[in-house]
Amino acid sequence: MFGTNVSVGGAMRAMAATACEELFAAYGVSLRVSSDSNRPFDQIVLCGVLGFTGSQLRGSVLLAGTEGPFAVSRPAQGQVRDWVGELTNQLVGRLKNRLRERGAEIAPSTPVVLQGEHIAPLPRHLLIPLMFDCDQGVVLVWVHVETTPGFELMPAADGREDAGTPRDEAIFF
């Protein structure tokens, strides 16, 4: 039986914030944590959703934003829609690496890309997005996670909640 786990959810949120900033920085977009993350957001957004499962935790990541950050970060000409799916995949890959280092294994699914207004997940409990501003627009990230009873992540080697492999270091498996 899976259920809400506040400590794992908080750790995943911290890991996702760092991973998202690093991901966009790798493609030349500097994100800043929004100073007003409670502001209403009703612009048309692009959104990638990717679920993941594991023996002790499961959940989903929703990466959304205005078109600007996605279009500017795209390394080659192509459809922004495809790039949103790829960034969502890379974001969850970064979370997967961080989770592995803390004793949890997950298997991501394939990303789904959507476009619309007022996009938000419908989790079983209140889920507040991470909101980032940048010169090109806004990026939002929701992380929903459920765990088996009693599951906790191992402490990070460096003691940080958001700890993980640096973005420029490769892990082969």
Image (tube, rainbow, N blue to C red):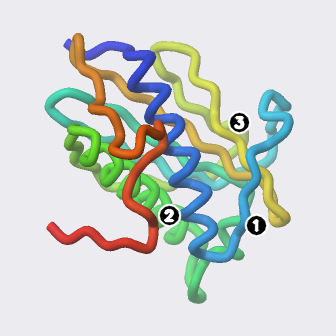
Which residue is depicted at the point 71% across and 36% down? 118
Residue 33: image x %, image y %?
74, 45
**Judging from the image, what secondary structure is the residue with disc 1 in?**
helix
Judging by the rendered image, the residue that carries numbered circle 2 is 87
Q: CB of mark 2 within 8 Å of CB of mark 3?
A: no
Q: Which numbered dot is residue 68?
A: 1
Judging by the rendered image, the residue that carries numbered circle 3 is 118
Quarter of the image that includes the N terminus: top left
Which residue is depicted at the point 39% across and 49% down? 95
Q: CA distance from mark 2 to mark 1?
A: 14 Å
Which residue is depicted at the point 78% across and 34% down? 37
Residue 20: image x %, image y %?
56, 54
Three-letter amino acid code of the residue under disc 3: His
Q: Nearer the viewer, mark 2 or mark 3?
A: 2
Quadrant position of residue 72:
bottom right
Q: CA distance from mark 3 to mark 1?
A: 17 Å
Three-letter amino acid code of the residue under disc 1: Gly
Quarter of the image that includes the C terminus: bottom left
Reading the chain from its start, which is encountered first: label 2 or label 3?
2
Reading the chain from its start, which is encountered first: label 3 or label 1?
1
Residue 139: image x %, image y %?
69, 51
